[in-house]
Amino acid sequence: MAQHVLVVFPHPDDETFGCGGTIALFTQSGIPVTYVCATLGQMGRNMGKPFFATRESLPHVREAELEKACQVLGIKHLIKLGLRDKMIEFEEPEALTSRFEQIIREVRPSLVLTHYPGYAVHPDHNALGEVTIRAISRLSADERPVVYAHAFARMCQEAIGPPDINNDISAVVDMKLAAIRAHRSQSQLMFGSKSSISRFLEQESFWTYRF
Amino acid sequence: MNPIEKVTVQSVLDGFLNREVYLHLETTNGAYAVHRQESKMAVGAYIRNGRIRFGRGVITGDRPYRVGLKMELGWVYAEGLTDFEVDQEGRLLLAGHDEEGRLAVALELSLNPFEL
């Protein structure tokens, strides 16, 4: 199977903070990346520092930031799913799962990056990771892509063990930093303290999901 | 947005009196409040496109401000409001930002439904 990476996350910037380096490593080596971004992060509380967005302008601001970050990371195909921030877990699960099954059958990825259900802190992360994994589990074993699940809950290593994929992203750290900067409304606040940015610039870790 | 000017906001509130209006009301301490150990609980609530009518609407307090809207069968209330904007569509956006500029509370009124 030709290599193709499908990235599934709920909010503009999830792709960058959690996986921007890994995505950049793929696109730099010529592997196409498709990103399904489920919401526009309409309900985020970061508005820039000093704040420049309002609750009503935020989705438009974040959509533009998302497009810029995708350009920086070399993501050529962006699918905006049009769901509402915070509400994914309340959607009808079957409808959403079928939609993902269809997307996965069309994109035919060899690898999927998504959140590890139950260990990804934000309810949207957990809900969307769960839907994605349920959709993939409906494929036959030979059609099924590998899944790198991203987890960052404080207790996650006690529950699921250490991550088996640990990507050194030092070769693409400038790309990741540029993508973080592209998400201006969400990242300005973090540039105040060195430690809050630097933890995103070392390595990126994933758990290969076992079906 | 700009720091709330009480007189301006009061006159905008008056313009919405006794009309069918759409309400956006929210409060949040952030989905990561527990994860970042800023709080023991992540707490938030929002209503988007609640349809209301109020016969009395008042802004009070002094930096931050409070707003109360008296309806026939109840009240709408927000506290901690610091900033305001009346946008091109005539919507009143009120928000309370914390010391880091993060939104903690919002109360917005519009004659047309808010975007979903």
Image (cartoon, coloured by chain):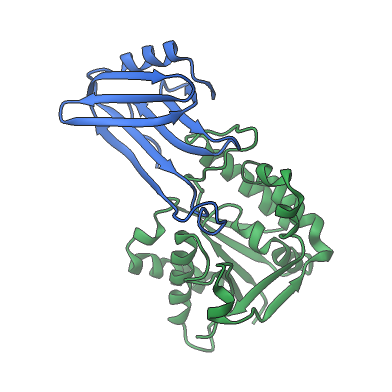
**A118 or B60: nearer the eye?**
B60
* Visible residue check, residue A76: no
Q: Colour of chain B?
A: blue
Query: Measuring 72% from the left and 58% from the top, which residue is drawn there?
Result: A74
The quadrant in which residue B36 appears is bottom right
Q: Name which residue lies at 51% across and 53% down.
A: B33
Q: Is residue A194 left or right of residue A37?
A: right
Q: Which residue is situated farthest in the right direction here? A: A171
Task: For residue B72, say whether it is visible.
Answer: yes
Q: Is residue A127 above or below residue B47?
A: below
The quarter of the image holding the C terminus of chain B is top left
Q: Nearer the viewer, residue B70 or B85?
A: B70
Q: Position of residue A144 (x, y in %)?
A: 53, 83
Which residue is nearer to you in this view: A141 or A123? A123
Q: Quadrant of residue A146?
A: bottom right
Q: Residue at x 44, y 27 (%)?
A: B94
- Residue A102: where, in percent of width, then height? 45, 70
Output the letter for the chain in green: A
Identify which residue is drawn at 73% across, 45% down: A191
Rendered image quadrant of residue B108: top left
